[in-house]
């Protein structure tokens, strides 16, 4: 079973991988390439990895939400000037000032996996290679109490593993989340499932958005939601029509 959360990304091709390796000047890890040949980047089902010392995440772990696509790999970041790292790094995950990357020192084909926090200036080797790193990953639910402070990738990973009730609870907690474009896009994604329980959750949340945050909403996305509601099972079309009149 793949660790990917399925998305719209097509699998990377062998040619695209080879071209990226040529541009980077490094051979990417075998296990990473194997995953890219299934799906070119995205959210993953595991969300933690163990560490040998405390990090800004916790006493003995770090967090991970996704694996970078070929185009998302990072080799040159401004913060890197603050920390002297051995060898060369290609980063495949970022959470604010915290990065995970392939560290090329002695073994150019199977680099070690390094965790770097450029705010605390902490560096840790968390696995000797990508295969070991993947084997160490595990899932543990994130507490939703501070969801408004979470980055969008973390929120998306939570939603990807949530049932209807948990989805509703999380999105209710995020009703005043400042990134309204992101919020409306999540509602659209749920409507596109066209499953009655999700449709009803979205309608309620969307109604509150129109009531309390009207001026902050993206008109095009609002229009798309209304368009989807017209063909959504379980939705009261008359009530939806009245809501649309209020929006106009």
Image (tube, rainbow, N blue to C red):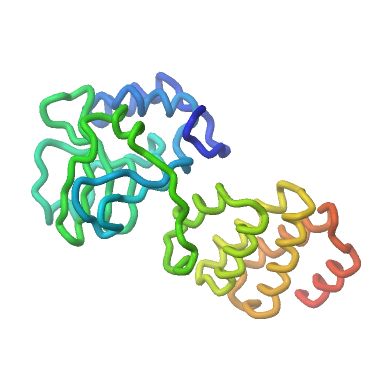
Q: Is residue 121 above or below residue 104?
A: below
* Residue 78 in view (yes/no): no
For the residue pair 225 and 43, the one nearer the viewer reads as 43
* Residue 244 at x, y percent in the picture: 80, 70
Which corner quadrant holds the C terminus? bottom right
Report if residue 44 is visible in the image: yes
Q: Residue furthest top?
A: 14
- Where does the image place residue 23, in percent across and percent down from the top left? 27, 30
The residue at 49%/29% (across/down) is: 2
Figure quadrant of residue 8: top right
Task: Looking at the picture, tell me which residue is in the foreground, 117 or 53.
Answer: 53
Where is residue 60 drawn, in percent x and y?
A: 26, 51
Residue 170: name its quadrant.
Answer: bottom right
Tell me: residue 213, above or below residue 116: below
**In the picture shown, does residue 213 fall above or below 164?**
below
Residue 151: image x %, image y %? 42, 60
Left or right side of 102 for 224: right
Which quadrant holds residue 120?
A: bottom left
Residue sitting at x 66%, y 67%: 219
Name the residue: 24% across, 41% down: 75
Q: Looking at the image, is 15 positioned above or below residue 163?
A: above
Image-based side of 38 in relation to 169, left or right: left
What is the total number of numbered labels drawn onto the structure image? 0
**Which sits in the foreground, 34 or 56?**
56
């Amino acid at each position: 079973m793949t660790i990917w959360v399925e998305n719209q990304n097509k699998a990377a091709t062998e040619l695209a991988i080879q071209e990226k390796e040529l541009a980077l000047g490094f051979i990417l890890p075998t296990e990473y390439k194997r995953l890219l040949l299934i799906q070119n980047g995205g959210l993953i089902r595991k969300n933690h990895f163990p560490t040998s010392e405390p990090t800004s995440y916790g006493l003995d772990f770090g967090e991970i939400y996704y694996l970078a696509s070929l185009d998302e790999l990072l080799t040159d970041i401004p913060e890197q000037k603050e920390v002297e790292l051995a060898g060369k790094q290609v980063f495949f995950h970022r959470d604010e000032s915290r990065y995970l990357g392939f560290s090329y020192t002695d073994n150019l084909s199977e680099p070690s996996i390094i965790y770097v926090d450029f705010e605390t200036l902490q560096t840790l080797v968390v696995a000797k290679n990508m295969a070991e790193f993947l084997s160490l990953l595990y899932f543990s639910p994130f507490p939703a109490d501070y969801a408004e402070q979470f980055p969008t990738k973390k929120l998306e990973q939570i939603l990807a593993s949530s049932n209807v009730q948990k989805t509703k609870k999380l999105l209710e907690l995020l009703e005043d989340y400042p990134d309204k474009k992101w919020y409306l896009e999540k509602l659209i994604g749920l409507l596109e499932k066209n499953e009655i329980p999700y449709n009803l959750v979205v309608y309620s949340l969307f109604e509150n958005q129109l009531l309390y945050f009207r001026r902050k909403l993206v008109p095009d996305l609002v229009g798309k939601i209304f368009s989807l509601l017209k063909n959504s099972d379980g939705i009261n079309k008359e009530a939806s029509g009245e809501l649309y009149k209020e929006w106009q």
